[in-house]
Amino acid sequence: MIKALETIGLVLVGIMALAFVGVIPQVEPGLSPVFWGCAGAALMIIFYRKRKRKQQDSESHST
């Protein structure tokens, strides 16, 4: 699961960079909705992994 999330996150960051530069056709360069969508999704993945790691640490310390 972690490897899949890392892969998805890297793809999102790549798309975000391409959208910012303007390489993707029919997407304006700069801070477009595609950029913000990818940035938000990558941020959600980071928060999800951090929360899961914190839960895992608290479970391992409580036993």
Image (tube, rainbow, N blue to C red):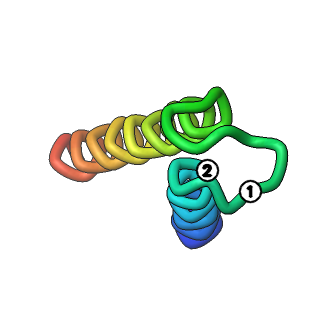
Q: Secondary structure at mark 2?
A: helix
Q: Are dots 2 and 1 in contact, CB under 8 Å?
A: yes
Q: Quarter-wise, where is residue 15 in the image?
A: bottom right
Q: Which residue is mark 1?
A: 24
- Residue 43 location, x and y as percent? 43, 37
Task: Identify the residue at horizontal 60%, vertical 31% (top origin).
Answer: 32
Farthest residue in the right direction?
26
Q: Amino acid at mark 1?
A: Ile
**For mark 2, does the 10 Å Cα neighbourhood hold few (<14), some (14 to 19), or many (20 or more) residues?**
many
Q: Nearer the viewer, residue 44 or 26?
A: 26
- Residue 37 location, x and y as percent? 62, 32
Q: Which residue is mark 2?
A: 19
Q: Nearer the viewer, residue 53 or 42?
A: 42
Q: Amino acid at mark 2?
A: Ala
Q: Earlier in the sequence, mark 2 or mark 1?
A: 2
- Residue 1 location, x and y as percent? 62, 63
Q: Nearer the viewer, residue 47 or 53?
A: 47
Task: Identify the residue at horizontal 53%, vertical 56% (top origin).
Answer: 21
